[in-house]
Amino acid sequence: MNTQVTSIHESDRSEIACVNPATGDVMGKVPVTKPEDMTTVVASARAAQKSWGKSTFVQRRAVLNHIMQHVLDHSDELCDAIVQDSGKTYDNAMLGEILPVCTKIKWLIKNGEKHLKPERVSSGMFMHKKARIEYVPLGVVACIIPWNYPLQNIISSLVAPLMAGNSVILKASEAVAWSVERFQRITDEALQKEGFATDTVQVINGYGETGAALVSSGVDKILFIGSVENGRRIIQGSAEHLTPVVMELGGKDPFIVCDDADLDKAVYSALGGTFINLGQNCIAAERVIVHQNIYDRFLKSLKQKAGALRQGVPVKGGKVDVGAVTTSQQIAIIDRLVSDAIAKGAVAEVGGKVPSASGGNFYPPTILTGITPEMDIYQQEIFGPVMLVMKVKNDEEAIAVANCTNFGLHSSIITKDAVRGECIAAQLESGASCINDFGLCYLNQDLPFGGVKYSGYGRMNGREGLRAYTNHKAVLSDRFPIEIPPKIFPVAANDYESAKSMINMMFSDGVGQKCKHFGRLLWLSIKGKLFS
């Protein structure tokens, strides 16, 4: 996910100037949390966690339910804030932010306790013992998140560590700082209703130096969602305290269209996969890989529909299909990549140029063909409304093209043949594969979410994502009140041979071999007692 952006007017690092990206209107300024204040922030989070870490699952569910109910009760107001801050459309704010937030919270309320309560496991060879795994809160979790989903990135990042009993410090992106105070109210009210300190969840504003101070502050775990370059900085900063990190670093996701695909399904899925939130989406379908037998018909239909998309200042009522890019810096990145590709032979079938006079951060939905490996856009994440359409001869070539980048977050396959879809998915190097749909793996909260290669490591969502915010503590206790001391010292003459016989008795194949070594172990025991 490309977060190599900064907010405007950074000459005064004590404040962030906030501008509506679709209209250019100045909304105001918000104060930043200074790096030197991070010690106090972390200390207050640790103090709050002492109480929250002892909370019951009933209390945690209640807090999460208050958060969800607030989001539902104030969804129109929250969508207004999202649209003002990010420039996205209202329908994307509702479906792309309110829906995923509620989906995640609902899953945690239903399943959180099941996956976090102590788990009984086998005690193995120690028949006289009982074994269990306890999922203990880590303490303070830091989250550093990007700007593409202002509400979802905040709430969805903090609710899992919160459910696991941690306090949370979340640094929001300076590009969408205007809405942070409004979103902080959601957790403040929920915690207060159940009698817990609001410092249990702290959402802070700041530039890169604030994030760097948080990373090196000695928190117990870090969730980072952003670019590969910034991810490397996070790892360097976390090394001082050996702080573990969950990394979600975006992707350049392949979307494979087989020659037996339903044309309308493939076209509409590709349009949604690339242009939802103007491509500012870590799982955007940047590379649409199409079999040659269907390529011409697919491209013709795709161009007609993409060229008809309406772009403008977001309003309610379905009058605008796509809104604005959140930052002017991202416009520059998109334009550089597209211009480089066209200069090297790519064809802009639709779009491909920054509007001459728009008044906001607008870049049109763009379709490029004729993509070749020497173009920067072939490997680099675009994070904007640009679809690369690539023609391939067969499934083998489609798989090779899909796997040829350094990223591996999400992938999609469109085909009428279920066996074929499964076969292709099994060969794709990605953290998720969605057959005959786009992006639904993320919404299914039972599935883990994360990537391979440069797309990061660790997982969000599901059981794995929830338990990632706990210490998996092993506990072995007595099954029976046995008081016989295990005498290891002093070493007796037959101890080595006895140990050898015991190991062979336990692990040899066949009853005969086991009986043989049991007999020898018995004889060594009698011998030791007779001649000791």
Image: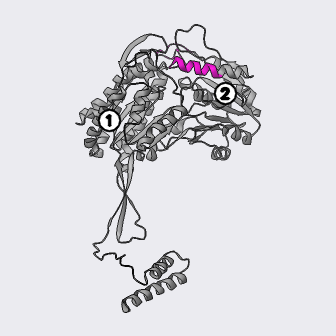
- Figure colour scheme: one colour
> Pointer 1: what residue?
42
Q: Quadrant of residue 166?
A: top left
Task: Give the residue type at disc 2.
Answer: Asp
Q: Residue furthest bottom?
A: 530
Q: Nearer the viewer, mark 2 or mark 1?
A: 1
Task: Give the residue type at disc 1.
Answer: Val
Q: Quadrant of residue 509?
A: bottom right
* Residue 326 lies in the magenta-colored region: yes
Q: Which residues are magenta?
A: 311-337
Above or below, 175 against 99 in this view is: above
Quick one: label 2 or label 1, which is nearer the N terminus? 1
Magenta segment's dominant SS is loop
Q: Is residue 415 visible?
A: no
Above or below, 334 against 418 in this view is: above
* Residue 231 lies in the magenta-colored region: no
User: Residue placed at 35% from the left, 25% from the top?
Assistant: 34
The 10 Å Cα crowd at callout 1, few under 14, some 14 to 19, many 20 or more, is: many
The 10 Å Cα crowd at callout 2, few under 14, some 14 to 19, many 20 or more, is: some
> Pointer 2: what residue?
376
- Residue 348 lies, in percent from the top left, at 70, 19
